[in-house]
């Protein structure tokens, strides 16, 4: 009898955790809301890692799907034009911190904030070498060496535009084009 009670308790605990995760998901919204769903989902499945910076990359969307890729990011390299209060084309401008991890992404309509720079500094994720080279404070022989490990897979998220709580994820090491995106049941009527 005790075993049955324990199993029921575990089952209900699991259900409550699952409903808690689902309650964090935004159902209707814009691309920025879809990114928040991606970050929430990713942070829920990667709770063991802390003090890590992840970057959310926006990829080409299809007719009914947003596509994002999450990768671990050791450093970001600001350029001379990446200044507080300015809009940046590539440098992260948005962030969300969850479970002692920092998620950053670029929103080309948002300005670079002092708060984001402070967060990146707290995670020791800013390298000003490129900035110093481009402004003449260091010579060209000091370019940072970027290590790439092609065996590491990124997590790709495919999210329905009409219901951004419906998402499909894959671990891949290659970027797909929209015509090769997986079939995701978005409930579209054809």
Image (cartoon, rainbow, N blue to C red):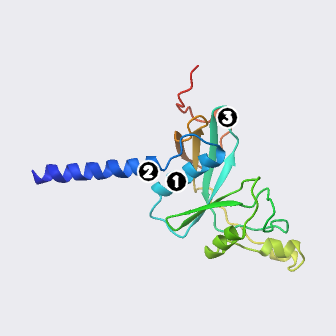
Crowding around mark 1 (Cα neighbors within 10 Å: few <14, some 14 to 19, many 20+) is: some
Earlier along the polypeptide chain: callout 1 or callout 2? 2
- Under circle 1, the secondary element is helix
Horizontal and vertical percent position of residue 15: 33, 47
Quarter holding residue 164:
top right
Q: Going 66% across and 62% down the picture, which residue do you hit?
A: 148
Distance (Cα) linking label 3 and label 1: 22 Å
Question: Which residue corresponds to mark 2?
Answer: 21
**Measured along the vertical axis of the image, is residue 59 above or below residue 78?**
above
Q: Nearer the viewer, mark 3 or mark 2?
A: 2
Distance (Cα) linking label 1 and label 2: 8 Å
Distance (Cα) linking label 3 and label 2: 26 Å
Q: Residue 17: tell me if it is visible.
A: yes
Horizontal and vertical percent position of residue 53: 60, 65
Q: Are marks 1 and 2 in contact (CB under 8 Å)?
A: yes
Question: Looking at the figure, which quarter contains the C terminus?
Answer: top right
Question: Which residue corresponds to mark 1?
Answer: 40
- Between residue 32 and residue 43, name the one nearer to us: 32
**Measured along the vertical axis of the image, is residue 119 above or below residue 180?**
below
Judged from this view, the residue extending furthest toward the right is 136
Judged from this view, the residue extending furthest toward the bottom is 137
**Measured along the vertical axis of the image, is residue 42 above or below residue 116?**
above
Question: Which residue corresponds to mark 3?
Answer: 62
Q: Going 56% across and 22% down the picture, which residue do you hit?
A: 189
Earlier along the polypeptide chain: callout 3 or callout 1? 1
């Amino acid at each position: 009898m005790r075993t049955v009670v324990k199993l029921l308790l575990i089952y209900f605990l699991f259900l409550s955790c699952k409903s808690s995760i689902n309650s964090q998901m935004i159902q209707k919204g814009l691309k920025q809301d879809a990114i928040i769903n991606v970050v929430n989902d990713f942070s829920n499945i990667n709770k063991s890692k802390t003090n890590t910076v992840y970057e959310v990359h926006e990829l080409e969307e299809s007719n009914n799907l947003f596509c994002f890729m999450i990768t671990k990011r050791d450093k970001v390299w600001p350029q001379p034009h990446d200044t507080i209060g300015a809009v940046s084309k590539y440098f992260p401008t948005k962030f969300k911190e969850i479970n002692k991890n920092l998620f950053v992404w670029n929103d080309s309509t948002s300005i670079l904030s002092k708060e984001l720079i402070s967060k990146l500094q707290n995670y020791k994720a800013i390298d000003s070498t490129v900035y110093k080279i481009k402004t003449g404070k260091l010579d060209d022989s000091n370019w940072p060496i970027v290590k790439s490990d092609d065996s590491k897979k990124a997590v790709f998220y495919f999210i329905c535009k009409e219901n951004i709580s419906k998402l499909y994820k894959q671990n891949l090491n290659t970027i797909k084009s929209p015509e090769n995106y997986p079939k995701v049941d978005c409930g579209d009527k054809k």
